[in-house]
Image (cartoon, rainbow, N blue to C red):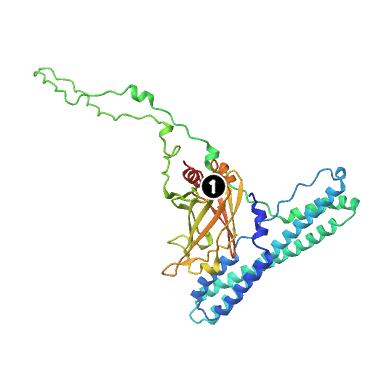
Amino acid sequence: MKSTFAGTNKQLIHPTSQSNSLYIVIMSMKSHFRILKTASLIGFALLVTVQLQAQLPEFPVLDSLPSQLDSLPEYEVKAFARRLADQALEVRDIFQQQADRTTLERDVATDQLAASEADTSATADERKILGKKLKTAKSEEKKAAKQLRKAIDVSEYAESVAVLDSAELRRQLPKAYKRVAALIPEPEVLEEPIADMIGVVAVSEPTDLISTETTVDSTAVVAEEPPSDKPSKKSKPQQPERPPIKTYDPKEDVLLNPPARPCVLTEDTRDAFSGELQREVQAEELFRFTNPALRSYFRDREHIICQAALSTRNGSYVLHLYFTVNDANAPRAFGNLPKNGIAILKLLDGETYTVYNLKLDEGKAADDGQSYTYHGQYLLNTGMFKRMQRSYFDKIRIAWSTGYEDYEIYNIDFFMRQLNCLLKS
């Protein structure tokens, strides 16, 4: 099943429900801020930041405005206006969520500063830092509120245009489209990889050096010349023998042609009754991730590490994802992996596939209580295999019970190798 990332946002998290859940988390935390010391506040606020900085739904992609509105049938123009009004409402909801988030951040910063002022052990520098943080939070809240008011005006205008009669609708629609498009921020421009700019570096073969190479017999005995009255000319010092120079062969370059990794099956049996194969490939690391905002907190470890493996049983193919979350507060920050929760697999060519988790997993705490492990089991459709066997794996979006998060894949040839290993005869 194919899907787009923008479509998943609406299926996964509704802005209003997310704001309510975050509000409950913040209000419960506010009761603790008044009794914690300043050092504890900073660590505790880190968890709040993880909640508040959850990825927001992506802005909708607007269809191109038809150049000749007068030549289009009336029903097409009305349908376009209706879609535009719905997309304007989506944009407004996103700005509403952002405004709610900045308000909650300002509340947290206010309580932090108040608790620091009440704490006699807090230093003046700590209070100064918290004061600056509160000032920044108020500024962001003001900007978000202003943008929300603008989005509300535009969405109301787009809705009023969508119900106009034919002639007035064709006249007002370009203006409504322009106002909605102005709300959507420009996409980030990614820098061009340096390899794409400079191309492939050529390597010349040292053919002349090989042809001019000479060898010297080190075992030869030089006969002593009889003494002569004439002074002998000084002989030139013998040149040391140079090692042979091997020419460059691209086929032997392990960077261009890395050796194939072995196919290791942890299970390879056949059911005695159905005759179906039961196989599972050895798990390997798929990615590791730490939010840059949390890097100073996770200095000696990664926040999330994911191992992955493919298996087949009774004709079903499953992608197993084993998450290790190095966080004692993982149940509060991530929740669980819900049954029928989605994962979106994005290939390097832009193709996306949506798969669904087969079982609920609440997570299992480690013996020291400082980390949790989760096991997601996502059912694969065999119709995906042909494309996956010749495309690289780019990114994956995981739906946790508290929201979703995107991860960049480092092991990009995962599906190529594991599918070939799993499906071998």
Binning the other alpha carbons within 10 Å of mark 1 as few (below 14), some (14 to 19) or many (20 upward) gives many
Q: Is residue 252 above or below residue 331?
A: above
Residue 29 lies left or right of residue 281; in this view the side is right
Residue at x 84%, y 59% (from the top left corner): 160
Q: Is residue 229 above or below residue 315?
A: above
> x%, y% of residue 2?
64, 49
> x%, y% of residue 338?
58, 63
Q: Is residue 86 above or below residue 18?
A: above
> x%, y% of residue 281?
45, 49
Q: Is residue 74 above or below residue 247?
A: below
Would you say residue 374 is visible in this rendering? yes
Q: Amino acid at mark 1?
A: Phe
Pointer 1: what residue? Answer: 393
> x%, y% of residue 162?
84, 56
Residue at the outermost left position: 227
Would you say residue 139 is visible in this rendering? no
Label 1 sits on a secondary structure element that is: strand
Figure disc tally: 1
Residue at x 62%, y 68% (from the top left corner): 136
Task: Please name whichever residue, 306 or 362, is drawn nearer the observer in this view of the structure.
Answer: 362
Residue 269 lies left or right of residue 96; in this view the side is left
Q: Quadrant of residue 216?
A: top left
Task: Please name whichever residue, 270 or 362, is drawn nearer the observer in this view of the structure.
Answer: 270
Q: Quadrant of residue 11?
A: bottom right
